[in-house]
Amino acid sequence: MKNNYNINFIFVIALFVITLSGCEDQSSIGIEVLPGGDLISIRNTIENTKSYTFSEDSITTSQPSKSLLGSFTDSIFGNTTIGFAAQYRLNEFPDFSKNAQADSIKLYLYYRNFYGDTLTKQKLKVYELESPLDYDTKYKQDVDLKSMAYSKLLAEYEFTARVRLDSLGDTAYYQSLIIPLDISLGEKLINAGTLHMINSDAFLEYFKGLYVESEKSTTPGGALLSLEAVRNGSFDGSALALFYHNDSLKSKISGDSVLIMPYTISSYSARVNNIQHDYTQTSFYDKLNSETVEDSLIYVQATGGLKSRILIDNLSSWKDSMTIVGTDTFPYAINKAELVFQIDTVASQVHKYQPPLQMLFTVVAENGIEYLPRDYVFNPTFYGGGLRSDYTYHFTITQHLQEIIDGNASNNGFFLTPARKNDQANRVVLKGSTSKTGIKLIVTYSKYTN
């Protein structure tokens, strides 16, 4: 009796597996619906999916976790040039007594990661801010930081990005740009009166900060640095350092200054990037921001660069085709709806440039506002969007699709963007809706009866 039970159990499991396998095979024929008697069916819709590349151009760049700096001309994505401005705060009340004199002043910018190459020279220019930055203001990427600065040039500095890893090859050491500034800034700081340094607000009114301008690269290459700007624990972060001496503290042998006054970027300091993109030399420029012509490739880029507009036109008709004739009854339950995007690894140059590790798939409301689907609110992990080992991004939009079918959500399209927009420079080329291996919407559903 026990043996018969085992045989029957194995037969049932095998039959169930065969049924599911049959569903997978039939999914390859497009949007044909499996016979109504099947317990679980899979529908793979590709034909009515459309994709386009649009500019983003509206991200907030103030107070990012990592500030960006540099200019990078990408052979695929054109040029991106990023400037950086920040406030510098007193760590302590300075005592510039006994005829203190400024000897030199230097700007220290630290980074560990960058996006680009280690071959191309870049040029930076440094200016003192004339207009104050406001910590609470949400600055956008098109903020004109140059207009907020004095015209006097404090420094010009050339560099090439570099990276040095530890012995295991998995942790990057801090790299630094040390930029000597015009001594006039050091003299301004050392001559600050007591009232200018009575508190942080008074000091920030006296010295409003610095703007570092990146000169746009005119040749392919360059790099976008990910600055370690903010002071954090024992690491002082990027800082301004004033070297000075006074009558009692000066080297008796060389006369070199032995005193240093640091001005640091704290978590309370305003930090802002301005970002400019130039796509005029790219292959997709004539199709950008247009829904007239589809392309087999779509382009997505952080730093307020590019996003993909996705349209799935057949969702309403799919509901209509599966509703019981003569009724409004839709006798199906959506078990899972998964949207899959495939990276074009050749066009993306994935072994040279890291694609975004996390993407967002947002819904467009009738008023044009973007929002995350209910699936994300329910469970961000299940919603997905992470980069997979097969170079795909998967999004679960089960609840949102059910809302459309139930008539509780409109179908105005979607946008695909990097999750981290203002503190990383990653970009990726994806296979578009006209590619045979491009975008897929895979819907698993079951039919129920009363």
Image (cartoon, rainbow, N blue to C red):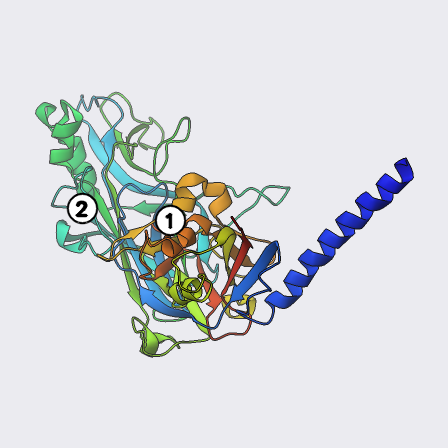
Residue that carries the numbered disc 1 in the rendered image: 373
Rendered-image quadrant of the N terminus? top right
Q: Residue at x 43, y 45 (%)?
A: 375
* Residue 250 circle label: none
Please state the horizontal and vertical placement of residue 220, each as a whole percent of the image.
41, 70
Q: Nearer the viewer, residue 183 or 123?
A: 123
Q: Nearer the viewer, residue 366 or 450?
A: 450
Q: Amino acid at mark 1?
A: Pro
Q: Residue at x 46, y 70 (%)?
A: 432
Q: Amino acid at mark 2?
A: Glu
Left or right: residue 85 compared with residue 111: left
* Residue 128 circle label: 2
Left or right: residue 23 compared with residue 346: right
**1 or 2: mark nearer the eye:** 1
Please state the horizontal and vertical placement of residue 225, each as a whole percent of the image.
40, 51
Q: Residue at x 33, y 60 (%)?
A: 411
Q: Secondary structure at mark 1?
A: loop
Residue 221 visible, this orientation: no
Q: Secondary structure at mark 2?
A: strand
Left or right: residue 389 compared with residue 322: right
**Neighbour tally class for label 2: few under 14, some 14-19, many 20 plus, Cα within 10 Å:** many
How much space separates mark 1 and mark 2, taking CA atoms? 44 Å
